[in-house]
Image (cartoon, rainbow, N blue to C red):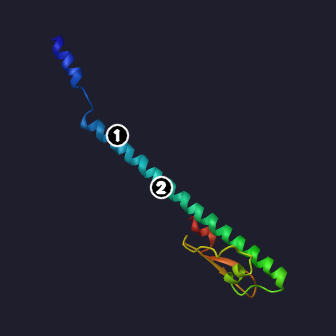
Amino acid sequence: MRRSALRRTADAGFTLIELLIVIVILGILAAIVVLSVSGITKTGHAAACKSDVETVTTASEAYYAQNQGYAADIPALVTAGFLHSAPVTTNGYTVNYNSTTGAVTSTPVCSTISN
């Protein structure tokens, strides 16, 4: 009898149900992480959009102060040395520049990118 008790504890392990429960819990945790990272990425894109708009606006105003007129387009701001490079448009938005008024906007509007 003692021998069978020892053998039983040696054979003890996790049941299939216990393993399935652990796998389901890990799957739920992985889904939560993926959704959190997705939200962080959208927030980052919105912040990058706002930063690009502010940078081009500042460069446009600096160009206007020096030349008494607005630049023809964003590449002209780069050529004149007011911008290091044109904003990258691969993050789901485009920076728009109005050479008549110097107004800088984005399409879509930066605040709607994170929604």
Task: Name the kind of residue labelled 1 in the image.
Answer: Val
Q: Residue at x 20, y 16 (%)?
A: 5
**113 lies left or right of 104:** left
Q: Quadrant of the C terminus?
A: bottom right
Res 24 → quadrant: top left
Q: What secondary structure is marked by label 2? A: helix
**9 lies left or right of 87:** left
Q: Which residue does the numbered mark 1 point to in the structure image?
A: 22
**Circle 1 Cα neighbour tier, 10 Å, few/some/many (<14 / 14–19 / ≥20):** few
Q: Distance between the residues labelled 1 and 2?
A: 20 Å
Q: Position of residue 105 (x, y in %)?
A: 67, 77
Q: Which residue does the numbered mark 2 point to in the structure image?
A: 35
Q: Can residue 68 be seen in this view?
A: yes
Q: Residue at x 74, y 88 (%)?
A: 100
Q: Is residue 97 visible?
A: no
Task: Name the kind of residue labelled 2 in the image.
Answer: Leu
